[in-house]
Each structure stands twice: as C-alpha cells, then as structure tokens.
Amino acid sequence: IRDDANGASAYVANYIIDRINTFHPTAENPFVLGLPTGSSPLGVYKILVEKYKAGLVSFENVITFNMDEYVGIPRDHSESYHTFMWKNFFSHVNIHPSNVHILNGNAPSLEAECVAYEDAIKRAGGIDLFLAGIGEDGHIAFNEPGSSLASRTRVKTLAYDTILANSRFFDNDISKVPRMALTVGVQTVLEAREVVVIILGQRKSLALQKCIEEGVNHMWTLSSLQLHPHPMIVVDEDATAEL
Ligand code: GLP
C-alpha cells in the first residue's frame, strides 16, 4: 500500500526495472513482459520512459505481449489499445517493433488470431512478468465476471458495466464503445512466472476487497491470483477503503 497513485506507480515501475536489470536479458534470452492498458498503468509507463531516458533501463531485449484489444475498431483509432501503447510507451523507448505483440481485433479469423497469440507466448518462452490493472467489476484483462478460470486467449463480449466504465474514453457515448474484445485468458495470466497488479482509487475498492478477502470466484476474476505462487498487488490508500 502506498499513499497515493504516484507512490504506487513509482513502486511498480522500479520493481519492473529491477526485474529486467537483474535478468540481464539478451537477444537469445529476452525478458518477456505482459502489459495492460487503462488509466491505472499510465503513471508506470511515464516513469519507465523517464528511467529509460536516464539510462537506467533498456528495452532492447524485452519482448512484450499486451493483455487485450477491442474488436472492430481500426488499429489507428485513438482509443485502440494499439494506439494507447505506442502513444504512452513504445514510441518513447528502445523496443524493437518486432518484439511488440498486440492482439489484432480486426483479424480475418479472431479465433485463429487468439490461437496464434498463445503460440507466440509459448515460443517466447512464456511471460516472465505480467503487469495488470483491474476493472471495477474485478476483471483482469477483459476476463469479465463469469469467465472460466481455465480460460485462454479468446473473444469476449464485454459486460455492460465495462462498456459503461470505458465510455469515458469514447465521448461518454456508450454506443461508441466496442461490444467485444480479444483478451488473454485467466489461465494465460496465471501461467506468467510473476504477476504484478496496480489498483488505484476508491472506485476499485470493492473489487479489491472481493478479490483478496473473499474466496477464488469466477465472478471476480482477479481473485484467481490467490492461486498464483508469485503475485503482487500494489495499491494506493484510496483503493483500500473496503478492506
Ligand atoms: C480495461 C482493460 C483492463 C483494465 C481496465 C481498467 O477494461 N481491459 O485491462 O485493467 O480497463 O482501466 P482503468 O485503469 O482505466 O480503470
């Protein structure tokens, strides 16, 4: 628990940098990082960029896999997760574009796209560290309430609550929010060697309480982390309101 969003973001960013640096990644043995979108990780990306510019970390031998992407909006749409990631992170660091993996929500076969994504993660040697945020309903990636805890990368219909929450990025117009997304599954996240979750603000406090003080429950998919050997949840004081 850190006092505020800045403190939590700095903790997470420094933790990731430490993990990359102690791993000593090379082209033959890269560090594989799973990444989220949303407002919660923005501070983390900002600090990672600052530390990269200060020469304290390199992304030369880092491979990334993003958690999810909307279905049916163009890749260059201002709210696509592709645009989000390049704008807020990738364009500002020395990552090789070929090392960046983001699900293609416009693939001719969405099912084939999901299978290929799981294969690519496997070929990369699995994910070393998955960074995640959560939705107000406790979802991790786009694993909405009711998702199987054994799920893998797939097409998911978004919950009404998520469409409503994300409408703030689409001119507050819920009719503009995509209805479906591609997302890594709960099991895909659980297979990462380490999972770090950043949770900020009071609007996430009920989800945090459900996920860590109650049992493993497919209606609050972050609770699946109780089954993971190396999870870490980093929060600001506001998020702890219901604990
Ligand atoms: C979307 C993403 C999630 C993210 C969530 C929270 O639903 N698919 O991965 O955790 O937004 O977003 P925010 O951090 O803006 O509250």
Image (spheres, helix red, strand yellow):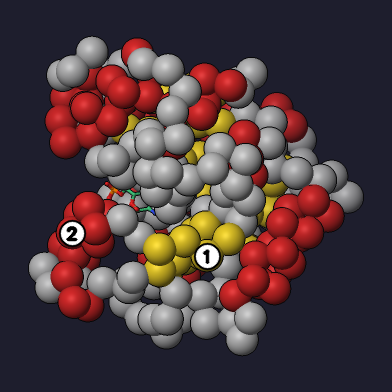
Q: What label sits on residue 155 in the rendered view?
A: 1
Figure quadrant of the N terminus = top left
Q: Residue furthest left?
A: 172
Above or below, 171 relative to 156: below
Quarter of image, res 176: bottom left
Along the viewing direction, whichever of 201 and 139 lies nearer the viewer: 139
Under mark 1, the amino acid is Val
Q: Residue at x 76, y 60 (%)?
A: 120
Report the front residue among 23 and 235. 235
Q: Give the crowd class for mark 2: few <14, some 14-19, many >=20 residues within 10 Å.
A: some
User: Which residue is the site of mark 2?
Assistant: 164
Q: Mark 2–mark 1 contact, CB under 8 Å?
A: no
- Res 241 quadrant in image: top left
Q: Mark 2 or mark 1: which comes first in sequence?
A: 1
Residue 209, image x, y percentages:
28, 20
Rendered-image quadrant of the C terminus: top left
